[in-house]
Image (tube, rainbow, N blue to C red):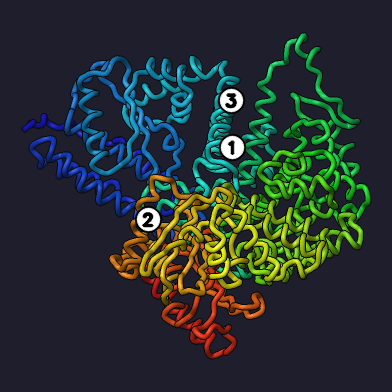
Amino acid sequence: MTQLPPASPALASDDATRDADPGDLILPAERILDIPALRTSLFEAASEASNEGGVRAAAVRLIGAAQAEARERIAAAIAERPREAFAATRSYAWVTDVVVRLVHELATRRLHPLPNPTTSERLTVMAVGGYGRGEMAPFSDVDLLFLTPYKITPWAESTIESMLYIFWDLKLKVGHASRTVKDCLRLGAQDFTIRTAMLENRYITGDRALGTNLDRRLWSDLFKGTERAFVAAKLDERGARHRKQGLRYVVEPNVKEGKGGLRDLQSLYWITKYIYHTDDAEDLVKLGVFRAEEYRTFEKAENYLWAVRCHLHLAAGRAVEQLTFDMQVEVADRMGYADKGGRRAVEWFMQDYFRHATAVGDLTRIFLTSLEAEQQKDAPLLMRMFKRGPQVKGGYEIVHNRLAIEDDKAFLSDKMNLLRIFEEALRTGLLIHPDAMRLVKANLSLIDDDMRNEKEARRIFLDLLLKHGNPERALRRMNELGMLAAFIPEFEPIVAMMQFNMYHHYTVDEHTIQCIKHLSEIEHGNLIEELPVASTILKEGVNRKVLYVALLLHDIGKGREEDHAALGARMARKIAPRLGLTKAESATVEWLVRYHLVMSDMAQKRDIADPRTVRDFAKAVQTRERLDLLTVLTVCDIRGVGPGTWNNWKATLLRALYRQTRRALEGGMEALNRENRGAEAKKALREALSDWETKDLRIETGRHYDPYWQGMHVTAHKVFAELLRGIKADEIKLDIHPDDDRDATRVCFALDDHPGIFSRLAGALALVGANVVDARTFTSKDGYATAAFWIQDADGSPYEDVRIPRLREMIRKTLMGEVKPREMIRTRDKLKKRERAFNVPTSITFDNEGSEIYTIIEVDTRDRPGLLYDLTRTLSESNVYIASAVIATYGEQVVDTFYVKDMFGLKFFTPSKQRTLERRLRDAIAAGKERADG
């Protein structure tokens, strides 16, 4: 056992008590941590220990308990005052300072005392990085620099090692480096990350002169004269970080690294300190970098983001930086948000979050691009001669390759210039200079009703959408500067509005801009192969003005208690004429906004093989013009939801609905009748089976009822013909084949018909993790069930060939009774933690008008792995015959639509029967939810 040397006498001005009452904490310092009492008990316990292990154990026990109590007191104060972030971050940093000083004192005076140190036996402990700024969230890393004057001595090495062991035992997440001043200068010159960390150095304890020397040498030998390189490096880092994190309005943003997050703020502070030699961002107002109101906006955003980060850490009990869905609900509650106006507390919280993130992004962009412009050297004369910039109109000039304003006063004398600058930027392809952006943002109050109603304002705005070929760029610029909401005030409530679900990837305003981007890409002919129908529609010609305005306004009614489509239509009735559309054009825009979900719902929630579906849709749209406009709008709306939302399955459904509806509108509704479709299907099958005997063909075309012939494509009819050919009693035949056109795997069954067959098949597929997207069953005249299921894996893709044998075997076992889905599914029907935050109210409707033969039961509820099995089992146990099921998934929400008859082949007309069936379905959903949440 290592015996300890005699302890050094403690000095009155000891490090642990220095800065004991720094002020500006969330509570008075003495209420957070009693330093004298802790220090006394620590050194008493240390003096009783006989070896280093005993001292460390005492330190961890006493400091750990005191630190935990201090953190609990800070957390309790934050709970009472949830928006006081700056005081909270200072408090966590102060507690960490106290711990570091006490551990250093214990190491140097009790564990490794040095009565007569040489000049080389000096040690300084510096805070660097975020800790160096004195800002810490509850579980932030503790970044330390152990500084020595020369090569590290055995004494310094032992002292540092003892300190680190105690820190680790205290469960502190310590990032550390041991260096000399020369090391710091050498490594900082090689690596901008190291240089940035040292820029934020702060003395904590030890030899103060050594720390002062490092700071002086950094400024004189490393930072001076390298401002341009540092700014460029920070701009590159910011760009790479943003590319990795994606758009600002990602619905699960990273508070630290995301666009408009704390790292953007820190970039500004680093550059401010490097360029202007100041730690105080408020000095940027005096230096003319920010206006006073811009700085106030910035300060509010910084405080808000730190508050969010603190609550996020406290809610998770660890260092978590991403606001996942479950954490959003928790943080919203901690910050005092409440449900109101038809929106959940979490949606109000996230809208505030995104608006603050936008403010940070705007201001840091202005600041950094201003600096970038300052740091740029003029291009060589020869290059300037051969690379001339675009010619700009009067009143503008090009400064550092950006569109700038020559005279601010002259510019503001005509409020129309606030719109014209966006047109000029699109026309020339230039970015807008940050000073011009600030001028626009600071003068949005000039935009009034008189200006909005001027003919010139209408022309400019519509030209931004229709003329210059890049409407996304114009709308994004206008939205970021607040111009879009100023020109169309009804747009303001949806700016940064989050929809709390797993379906929408973006905020409402960002979704709208994404939709416009997709429309522009289709117009430019970039998506002909992927979107042949929409591309052809636009090539043949539609009213572009109507389409762009309808797409811009389609979600403008969101966020209220009323149905957003109905409310949005009424708003569009007023906005469209204000934008210069004629009465007829405005009426079409209103109709498109009102019914912008109808085509998507019909395609995804109804059986489009049923002629009644197409007939009802054709009656709704009435004209070919409306059908064309609605089709393109629907495609853009779905694609604008987020990456991966659009797929071949949705494309196939929409194309089929479009073509059938167009045929009905142009050739009359009689083109849709069952007899015609049945005759066409039988003819197609005879051609596909041209090598069959006439007798066999006659048996196959005569064994099925009419719904079979209208319900599937000839490829499926051919598969079933092969499966049924020579089938024996009690035999189960199976065909699993990729359906590339639909991004799904098609599973076809042929077997003896018996009750509950649909449910058993659904159970088998659930056990292998398959998501059913479409399914239909038919009974032949000779007593066989033919069932087709279209399935995808958990990622929404067709099953790979290597996984099909397991799929086939599980289906066989289930149908043979070797596996009981009801028992096995209990362990697999679970929701992930982050998904439990979503509440989807269950809605069950009965429709006897949407199909001539069947009752349509639509179940809209929370999705989970075993839901379809639970629903089909409940229907089966209630003696309900399921002819087909259409499944539409929207993130955590699913709409399962069943085409059913009762046991006598009749519709469910009786209200009492409907109520009984609804109650049983709701009970099954509730039981499944309890199982999934458990």
Q: For the C terminus, give its image quadrant.
A: bottom left
Residue extending farthest to the left is 1
Tell me the tag on residue 342: none
Q: Earlier in the sequence, mark 3 or mark 1?
A: 3
Circle 2 residue: 808
Observer-nearest of 1 and 805:
805
Tell me the tag on residue 281: 1
Residue at 66% x, 50% y: name it.
510
- Report x, y in % for residue 587: 85, 64
Residue at 59% x, 45% y: name it.
248
Q: Earlier in the sequence, mark 2 or mark 1?
A: 1
- Report x, y in % for residue 623: 83, 63
Q: Are marks 2 and 1 in contact (CB under 8 Å)?
A: no
Kindly report the distance in space between the C-alpha atoms of the residues bearing marks 3 and 1.
17 Å
Quadrant hosting residue 119: top left
The amino acid on which the numbered mark 2 sits, given as a three-letter code, is: Arg
Numbered disc 1: secondary structure: loop
Kindly report the distance in space between the C-alpha atoms of the residues bearing marks 3 and 2.
60 Å
Q: Is 676 positioned to the left or the right of 131 in the image? A: right
Q: Is residue 308 visible?
A: no
Residue extending farthest to the right is 455
Q: Earlier in the sequence, mark 3 or mark 2?
A: 3
The amino acid on which the numbered mark 3 sits, given as a three-letter code, is: Val
User: How many C-alpha atoms fall within 10 Å of the one at disc 1: few (<14), some, or many (≥20)?
Assistant: some
State which mark lies toward you, 2 or 1: 2
Circle 3 residue: 231
Quadrant hosting residue 359: top right
